Amino acid sequence: MANAKMDESMRDVKRRLEQRNQFRVDLGQRIVRMRIWRGIDSSTLCRMLGWNHDDLFRIEHGFADVTLLEGAQLAAALGCSLNELIGDLV
């Protein structure tokens, strides 16, 4: 019985990690699309945000989480609301 609960718990943890990873990938792709659609290259966006290019790269490729503050900064730099940036992804 304990093993079954542990297996179920591990499956739940794995599912949540997969969802989190997919969210990061989807958000990164959206940032890239919005940036390109607005004619902003990654170097320009980094300058606008005062960010390191490596940090933006990790976010755009789904390797890093985005804090609420970073999300708000990105939305402002991309000329959209935070809701437009992440609204239907969550």
Image: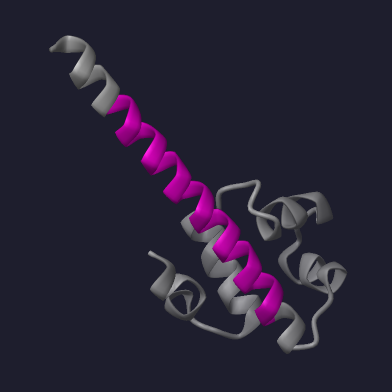
Q: Is residue 76 above or below residue 22?
A: below
Q: Judge left or right: residue 71 versus residue 44.
A: left
Q: Which residues are magenta?
A: 9-34
Total labels drawn:
0
What residue is drawn where x is 65% and y is 46%?
Answer: 63
Query: What x and y, as percent, mark residue 39?
Result: 80, 87
Residue 30 painted magenta = yes
Q: Decide which of 6, 58 is in the foreground and name it.
A: 6
The C terminus lies in which quarter of the figure?
A: bottom left
The N terminus lies in which quarter of the figure?
A: top left
Image coloring type:
one colour
Q: Decide which of 75, 50 is in the foreground and name it.
A: 75
Query: What x and y, as percent, mark residue 67?
Result: 51, 53
Q: Is residue 22 above or below residue 10?
A: below
Q: Decide which of 15, 80 is in the foreground and name it.
A: 15
Q: Judge left or right: residue 44 versus residue 83.
A: right
Query: What x and y, as percent, mark residue 16?
Result: 38, 42
Q: Quadrant of residue 12?
A: top left
Residue 87 painted magenta = no
Most common secondary structure along the magenta stretch: helix
What residue is drawn where x is 47% and y is 58%?
Answer: 68
- Residue lying farthest to the bottom in this orientation: 38
Query: What x and y, as percent, mark residue 29?
Result: 64, 68
What residue is drawn where x is 40% and y is 74%?
Answer: 88
Q: Judge left or right: residue 54 versus residue 5.
A: right
What residue is drawn where x is 63% and y is 63%?
Answer: 28
Q: Is residue 1 above or below residue 78?
A: above
